[in-house]
Amino acid sequence: MRIKWLAAPLALALVLGACAGDDNGTTDEEVETEDAAETDDDGDDGDGEAADADAEPVTLSMWVFTGMNLDDLVGQYEEENPHVTVEIQSTEHGDHHDALFTELAAGGGPDIAAIEVAFINEMAEQYQMWHNLYDYGAADIEGDYLDWKIEQAQNVEGDHLIGIPTDIGGMAMAYRWDLFEEAGLPTDRDEVSDLWVDSWEDFIEVGTEYTEATGRGFVDNEANLWNAVVNQDPNTFFDADGNPIYDESEHVQYAWDVVIDAIESDIIAEVPAWSAEWEAGMSDGSFAVLTAPAWMMGYIMDVAPDTEGNWDLAEVPEAGGNWGGSHLGVPAASDNPEEAYALIEFLLSPENQQYQFTEYGQFPSVPELFDSEEIQSFESEFFNNAPVGPIYADNAERVVAQNTGPNYNAIDTEFGDGLGRVLDGNESPEEAWESVLNNISSQLGM
Amino acid sequence: MAAVQSDDPGLTPRSTMSWWFRREARIAPYLYISPFFLLFLVFGVFTVAFTAWVSLHDWHIFDTAAGGGTFVGLDNYARLLNDARFWRSATNTFSILLMSTIPQMLLALVLAELLNDRRLRGPHIFRSGLLIPNITSVVAITIVFQSLFGRHYGLINVALDFIGLDMVNWTSSRIGSHFAIATMVNWQWTGYNTLIFLAAMQSIPSDLIEAARVDGAGRIKRWWKITVPLLRPTILFATVLSVIGNFQLFAQPLLFAPGVGSMGGNDQQFLTILLYLYNMAFRQFQFGYASAIAWMLVLLTAVAALMVYAGVGYLNRRENRSALEVERMRERANARQEAGA
């Protein structure tokens, strides 16, 4: 009798378990196959019209990370080239690169893959895992892009190009003028810039004033502040020849001291970057400034639409700096390198990079656009009509390319962790600096 | 069978047939079970053996295409013994294991006792309910709990604040993060263990319990003195499963603080062994070292499981006397029944 009653829940468990199993699979991988339905339709169209166009129908797989927002342009390309079907897989930044490395090492990979700047050096070292885009006509267009972005994607000899640049991440400081007003600070973007443009020290002073007036954090978290400061100089973790200098670099030490100073001045809101609380914080005012590479604008507009008009942009202290920006490349395993290259060339053309900027805030890596009428006159309503075009264009001309090297991202993570330990009160600044250097040498064998 | 025939192509079909008939009885059973063993050989034995081989090499992911890494003997294991981060992950794993297994087993024993009550109406509803956390996706559970344990707006911190206590930074505090992760494990697995215990309880002869009742033992005493000791083999089974499962704790700590810094917290507060292995293999791409971690994990799991067995064996010997008592009780109950009849 009793045993029979147990059978019911077990059967239920099996049925539900099967459902949960499916669920699990997709959530685990955090894979969204975007436009699945649309892609199917296009595939049918493609079959129909391929005969007219005399082109072999082809399906291109494309791996990007979240926030690249290439769907509009891909859709447009599919419409104009009915024989092409593109399957976009968009994964979170870290997972995307982990999966890509693993896939490449196993001799596989999609037809097109995005490589973020923190990983471009390691990929360029393994250039044989990528099709050489010079074989497909990249030499004709490389002049359109910033030299340093092209160099990042070349092998040492400079005759093998693994990727075409997407956007660059010139820096500005996004701030909530409504919260500034509340705290009795200036709200006009030029006046705000004047408050801190000379030094990070001034920035921290403004923050202290804000925090004293409101009792709330000023800047979102230690990691984003660190990114903004450390990326202002090329000689951070590696010198120009790619030798590791993270333990002796003056700029790394300087950036560390700035963030420690900010932690000790108690102006950090302690909401971890990319967390749900961070996204909520953009609306609810738990912090008032956010270091904002151009692409961050799109992110803010996306997660905090109700703050439209409350944000504005000022200059970043001590000017310059670059955070992010990617390349699109064709893994060697792709059987359709010509078609893949044609799509990349289209997606990253100067015209379409301009579209990505005005639509999603991704600043072009095409210098001839910097002075163009469209960019120079581009204002953002969301950012209180700030002239975001000229602000980022001005910054882009001052961007210095970081020297990169192996384990760049892992080293950066160790420094970020160390600052986190100081913020959490688990270690003193001196202990944290020591443990960061120890961890890098023991973990990465450097 | 085609394979068997082609082994000996010179034979005529007729003699092949008779050859087959003579040996069929002996060979066929092996053929029937061979699919499993072939698959097991490829995906089980080979991969495990290959991991051991890789663990003896300095093997970066990109070495794979070039045919393998450099042979370094036991260097990876030597490095492991001195790797503070590995031992921190091992202590974390052990601490989370204690914080999840012990409360889980106790709670499951109590719940099973409550559910094993004839007066309970609609018992199947409660029993199905117990399984629902277990069949929910671990990712979904973790995301919900991660939000409950949020630093500023998490429900638990809000509640702590409301009753006048300090908010806890769950991802920064080592013990706090262990508590949060153990809570997720407990949430998911308590119901499952309850059902296992419940099934075992139903096979306990009711005359034992009745005899104890007649002797004047209260419900708690009957549960602790009779039910629990008789469930010992089941508890052992459930505990060993829980230990093995906890050594493989991965999704909860991975998703507990997504997107920020290192896996397992900025001070490795909740880095588990498997998370460290994953990080080494698929973030740092040091396959050789990651394989050594995998083998160490096997070793530690085996040691822990043996320790559980040894502990229970010790209890068994120590309490042989109480088993005798149970036997005596049974005799007394029988005697009483006979006397009554």
Image (spheres, grey):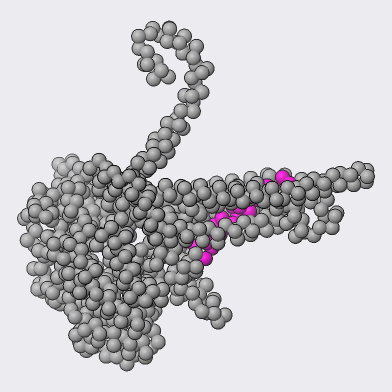
B118 sits left or right of B65 in the view: right
Is B320 within the magenta? no
Q: Is residue A287 above or below residue B100?
A: below
Which residue is nearer to you in this view: A326 or A88?
A326
Q: Quadrant of residue A293?
A: bottom left
- Residue at image position (73%, 47%) is B320
Main secondary structure of the magenta stretch:
helix
- Residue at image position (39%, 60%) is B85
B289 sits left or right of A383 in the view: right
Q: Is residue B106 above or below residue A312?
A: above
Q: Is residue A194 above or below residue B282?
A: below
A28 sits left or right of B187 in the view: left
Q: Where in the figure is residue A313, as x and y percent of width and height?
A: 24, 80
Screen quadrant of the C terminus of chain B:
top right
Q: Residue furthest bottom?
A: A184
- Residue at image position (38%, 67%) is B266
Q: Where in the figure is residue A315, as x and y percent of width and height?
A: 20, 81
Residue A304 in view (yes/no): no
Which residue is nearer to you in this view: A330 or B24?
B24
Q: Quadrant of residue B337?
A: top right
Q: Quadrant of residue B331?
A: top right
Q: Which residues are magenta?
A: B179-204
Q: Where in the figure is residue A42, as x and y percent of width and height?
A: 26, 49
Screen quadrant of the N terminus of chain B:
top left
